[in-house]
Image: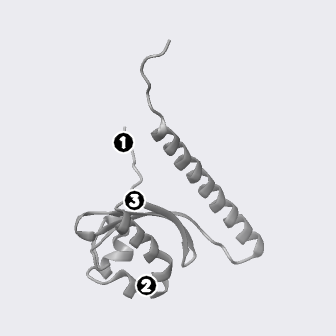
Amino acid sequence: MAVTVKQSPFVLLDEDYRIVEVDSPAEAAFGPLLGRNVFDCFPDATSLYRPYYEKARATGKVVEFAQYYDGYVMLINARPVEDGGLVLGWEILGMLDTMTLDALCMSLGRILTKLGDEEKRTRQKRQRASLRLIEGGA
């Protein structure tokens, strides 16, 4: 029996925000941009993404955030690595359909449901991580 594992795409940025590695799911969009600064390639995205990337670098912790860009709502994961680099992973939560008001409402509803599900999973992870075993007692 074969098991299919859905792999989220990832991109590795160096300390100067240059794209230095892409995996196969990200190849079509980012492969041609290897060696280039991601914000030079997408200048209108700089103010949306850079603060999160800088926070990940400054804290040394993974930063997760939802972002709308170019018609898509994505859940982004920025993980700092050695030498000031960042591994960026993402999941597309949905595309906003702006053809009609009804289509927009439906696409927003689907995206909000996915965001709610992700928020619930995140809250459960935090709760599990905060549980501690206390020995002793009756």
Question: Mark 3 and mark 2: span between their CA atoms?
Answer: 22 Å
Q: Position of residue 132 (x, y in %)?
A: 45, 32
- Give the residue furthest to the front: 137
Kindly identify which residue carries mark 3.
62
Q: Amino acid at mark 2?
A: Phe
Q: Which callout, 3 or 1, points at the residue further toward the start of the chain?
A: 1
Instruction: Confirm or deny contact between disc 2 and disc 1 (CB under 8 A).
Output: no
Q: Is residue 85 left or right of residue 119?
A: left
Closer to the eye: label 3 or 2? 3
Q: Amino acid at mark 1?
A: Ala
Which quadrant is home to the N terminus?
A: top left
Q: Is residue 74 visible?
A: no
Residue at left 50%, top 77%?
Answer: 48
Kindly identify which residue carries mark 1.
2
The local secondary structure at tag 1 comes to loop
Q: Which callout, 3 or 2, points at the residue further toward the start of the chain?
A: 2
Question: Mark 3 and mark 1: span between their CA atoms?
Answer: 32 Å
Closer to the eye: label 2 or 1? 2
Instruction: Confirm or deny contact between disc 3 and disc 2 (CB under 8 A).
Output: no
Q: Nearer the viewer, residue 127 or 101?
A: 127
The local secondary structure at tag 2 comes to loop
Residue at left 44%, top 25%?
Answer: 134
Q: Is residue 99 visible?
A: yes
Question: Mark 2 and mark 1: span between their CA atoms?
Answer: 38 Å
Q: Position of residue 49 (x, y in %)?
A: 46, 75
The local secondary structure at tag 3 comes to loop
Q: Which callout, 2 or 1, points at the residue further toward the start of the chain?
A: 1
